[in-house]
Image: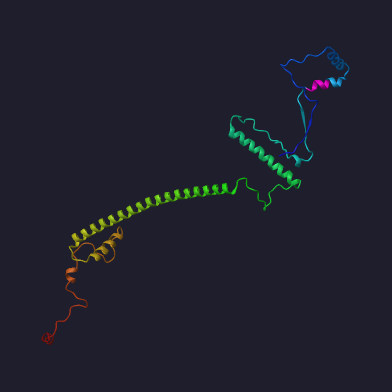
Amino acid sequence: MPVYDVAVSKSKKRKLSTDGVDPPPVRGEERRRVEKQVETAPADNREGNGNAERLTTVEFSEPAQWVERMALTSTKPLPSDLNADDDPKREEAFIQQALLSVVRGISLLEAGDVPWKRPDDYYAEMFKDDVQMSRIASAMEKSKARIEERAHRRAMKDQKKYGKEVQAEVLRQRAKYKRDMGARISEWRRKRKGNEDLDDILNADETTSGSKGRGAARGVRGGGTTRAPRQKNLRPGGVKRRPGKNARRRR
């Protein structure tokens, strides 16, 4: 805060007011003596008696050094179109004026080599005691834990919802797979009539379905009779020779 040297100059004490109170009776000799003193008194004293009823005058004498008072007046006026009833805009204009004054004051302090920053090892005593600060810290911890718990519950809810969607999608894929397999098996039974192995038929169907639009896969024929009945009596390595006469006897 700026420091001011206040010099109060007072004139004579104000006379007590006796409004509404009847003055005491004055004798004739005393009245004549008072009137004579007033007539013979100097003019300055008479004027001083009249000024005694005036208010006390206060004079301010500011120090010559700016550091002793640290008072700044903003040189930037407020906007002319500022509405006095608009509190947010008015407060914002005041803040801007104060910021300009702060910047100017810091520059003046630095020019005068006056330290204005708090030292790094400076620890101010807290206005609140340790008990109240511990209560505030515990309240902040509880609030933080409550916020984290709420966020965790929301995340678990979203994860559970996503898990249900994933599970439903898996069940749909399984049902689709079962339908497709049932349809392929039915088609195999209808076309192949049970003469070929199921794995070969499924592999052939997958190869055919994978090459759709470019013709059938190489070595895979569509339609026609199967060779399974003719290969049924064939053994690996060709037809075996019939056992000889001695072999039949050893049996």
Residue that lies at the very extreme toward the top in this rendered image: 28
Whether residue 127 sits left or right of residue 168 in the image: it is right
| Percent coordinates x, y for residue 78 in the rendering | 66, 33
Q: Is-magenta flag for residue 178?
A: no
Looking at the picture, does residue 137 appear above or below residue 19? below
Q: Could you tell me how many numbered marks the image carries? A: 0
Quadrant position of the C terminus in the picture: bottom left
Looking at the picture, does residue 77 appear above or below residue 190? above
Looking at the picture, does residue 23 appear above or below residue 158? above
> Which SS does the magenta portion mostly show?
helix
Query: Camera-side residue: 213 or 86?
Result: 86
Quadrant position of the N terminus in the picture: top right
Report the span colored magenta. Answer: 47-52
| Percent coordinates x, y for residue 169 in the rendering | 33, 53
Query: Camera-side residue: 36 or 222?
Result: 36
> Which residue is located at x 51 percent, y 50 percent?
141
> Which residue is located at x 68 percent, y 40 percent?
100
Quarter of the figure with residue 98: top right
| Percent coordinates x, y for residue 225 in the rendering | 18, 64
Query: Camera-side residue: 187 or 146?
Result: 146
**Colour style of the rendered protein structure:** rainbow
Query: Camera-side residue: 161 or 183?
Result: 161
> Which residue is located at x 64 percent, y 36 percent?
94
| Percent coordinates x, y for residue 145 in the rendering | 48, 50
Whether residue 129 sits left or right of residue 22 in the image: it is left
Whether residue 108 sits left or right of residue 237 in the image: it is right
Quarter of the figure with residue 79: top right
